[in-house]
Image (spheres, coloured by chain):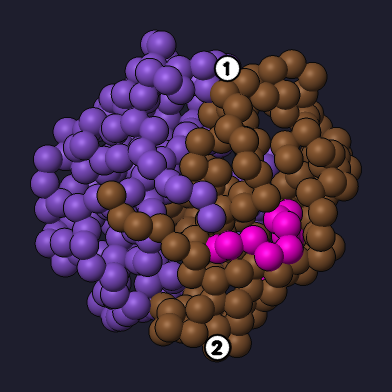
Chain colours: A purple, B brown
Amino acid sequence: MHDINPIGIIYSPHKSIEDMPIQPKGASDYTGHIIVDEKYVDGLQDLDGFSHIYLLYSFHNTTRTELLVTPFMDNQTRGVFATRSPLRPNHIGISIVKLKKVVRNNVYVEGVDVLDGTPLLDIKPYIEKFDAVKESDSGWLQASNEEIRKKRSDKRFR
Amino acid sequence: MHDINPIGIIYSPHKSIEDMPIQPKGASDYTGHIIVDEKYVDGLQDLDGFSHIYLLYSFHNTTRTELLVTPFMDNQTRGVFATRSPLRPNHIGISIVKLKKVVRNNVYVEGVDVLDGTPLLDIKPYIEKFDAVKESDSGWLQASNEEIRKKRSDKRFR
């Protein structure tokens, strides 16, 4: 398999793993600044045509792996692969964020639900015709949009 | 940063990097069988409640990184981060696929656009309230659904 190394750093207003929005949908007021490594600047061409991008990153502040976790939006344990908890093997997170602008190797985004200093692994464009799912079931997650927006993290996934 | 290791293998009908569907939307006839490492079986609990899942995987057959690529759906070069090309740094792919069933450490999915034997890095539930994007712009990608469904890969990203 390939070696995996950060391609940049995500800077955000979230300095602590507690009291953070748990998803981009609760983070629309938070702006993030991504600095992509200078050597990758050419790879950012044409990104500014997209309104939304995927960030793939490392949950760098999480050290444990747990196979059963109690998600923020639930009060029962669930298999970690049925949640978005950082306690997963490989500790890779994804977030879909709104792209504000790209200035050379600086990428400004809105809806940042990651910790300040998070190592960035990849940026991909959100492409509606590839990614939109028309009808889906979300299993155990039955919370309302309002509950998701208001929910804030605690220490459980440290 | 964390060490990253496969958590399982994705088996698919696609034995060669050529003539594959380029996205799950063109792969609805293709069923995949994922074998997750036995030691992670508990992490799959509750996954079967979800109709769609993200697969994160390694583009294991791709050895090069290119910052400017000509995507399958275009005839101009684009920055690799503005495409879904495998030639990206870290060579991580994501696909949203339909979940058919989970039997112990076996996960059966529909809409598989990855090569047979692909190393799996993570499974995450697709959660409509987290992931659905209401309005978006897809930059250079202006192809129709029909064109995306019919498009097949060639050797360019080997």
Left/right placement of residue B58 relative to residue A143 reads right
- Residue with the mark numbered 2: B104
Q: Is residue A43 above or below residue B109?
A: above
Label 1 amino acid?
Answer: Asp
Q: Is residue B55 above or below residue B44?
A: above
- Residue with the mark numbered 1: A46
* Chain identifier of the residue bearing label 2 in the image: B
The image shows residue B113 at horizontal and vertical percentages of 73, 54
Query: Which residue corresponds to the image point at 41% horizontal and 11% vertical from the top-left?
Result: A104
Residue farthest along the top direction in this orientation: A103
Query: Which residue corresponds to the image point at 77% horizontal and 23% vertical from the top-left?
Result: B74
Label 2 amino acid?
Answer: Arg
Q: As rendered, which of B17 and B13 lies closer to the eye?
A: B17
Place residue A33 in its image quadrant. Answer: top left
Give SS at disc 1.
loop
Q: What range is drawn magenta here? A: B109-120
